[in-house]
Amino acid sequence: MLAAARELGYAPASTAWALARGGTGVLGLTMTTYGDLPVPYTEIPYYAELTLGAMAAAHERGYLLLAMPSSMSPWMWLNTPMDGVIHVGPRADDPVRAILRERGLPMISEGRPPEPHGCDAWVDTDHDAGLRLLLDHLTESGARRIGLSQPLHDDEYPRLIAHAYRSWCDGHGMPALVEEYASLPDYFTAEQDAVSRLLHRDPRPDAVIGVYSDSGHNILAAARHHGLRVPRDLLVACVSEDPDYATTNPLVSTVSLRPDLLGTEAVDLLIAVINARSGADRRRLVQPVLMPRRSTRRAAGRRNGTP
């Protein structure tokens, strides 16, 4: 059947429409969140799920999806044939975004642009909702001093997380306990050092959260270094898609940002922009999901403040 379709020149409706307008039937997906550093994006669960979700959505609509490497010359960004681009993780100082704007391609962002324009179209996770899910869950488990290891990077994600965390702490009358760390070039060591600084505070936090894929592993390592038992002495949770947290000791509670749905929404929005579809919502939020596990389940006596 596929062979017959090829002989007849068959193309699904959306691709046929693109080709009729002189398009290519190809959508681009950038992987430049960390600039030219050789980051293995497809090995990071968040980006892997995002790419697969976008690819499936593009194929369902009759488009090819081209996942573009992190390091490309300006010539390639300006000349690779595409009908539009999903720009992942736009940054404040973003040469790729500038080049794509110069080219005039239809473009939407996965993640809110740090310096937004009124015409911007983007999809993102509802980070306020995600932090509320996590922080409310920790307080239900008895936490009263919740620390945050805060990455520094020039995309919007860390700022949105910090704002959601501080707003929640203000609203609940709890102290905001934050230690910042540089996310590049070695965020593993930098985050473990930041968590250690949190755990050196007096009084120390009774829970610590992180917001990157490996944050749970980093917090567990810092807790072990300080001789703290999880969850008896310290509750631990993170924002991550890493399936390994379902097998760690203890199992680590996570919030999923649903990158698979973000990929689907990004493709739908990009095609709407390409086709100038009227009435399309140009700013879309995906709802996160809490996955509670052993690392945030303290014994009843400990929740009540007893040994």
Image: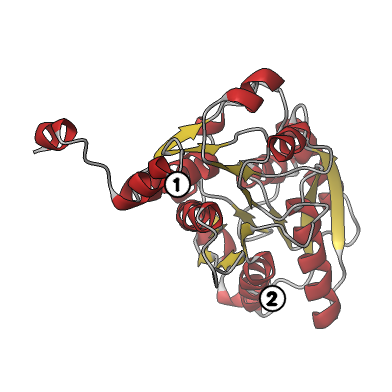
- Nearer to us: label 2 or label 1: 1
Name which residue lies at 80% across and 52% down.
Answer: 114
What count of labels does the image hold?
2
x%, y% of residue 42?
A: 50, 32
- Give the mark nearest the N terminus, 2 or 1: 1
Q: Secondary structure at mark 1?
A: helix
Name which residue lies at 79% across and 57% down.
Answer: 117
Q: Identify the mark at residue 306; answer none if there is no mark.
A: 2
**Front-lying residue, 179 or 7:** 7
Packing grade of label 1 (10 A; few <14, some 14-19, many >=20) is: many
When asked about the image quadrant of residue 143, the answer is bottom right
x%, y% of residue 222?
A: 72, 42
Q: Check if mark 2's residue and mark 1's residue have beta carbons within 8 Å.
A: no
Left or right: where 180 falls relative to 20: right
**Front-lying residue, 270 or 196:** 270
Say if residue 248 shows up in the picture.
Answer: no
**Front-lying residue, 147 or 163:** 163
Left or right: where 8 falls relative to 45: left
Q: Quadrant where the C terminus lies?
A: bottom right
x%, y% of residue 105?
A: 62, 41
Q: Which residue is mark 1?
A: 54
Name which residue lies at 77% across and 73% down.
Answer: 144
x%, y% of residue 11?
A: 27, 42
Left or right: where 181 falls relative to 266: right
Cα distance, mark 2 to mark 1? 49 Å
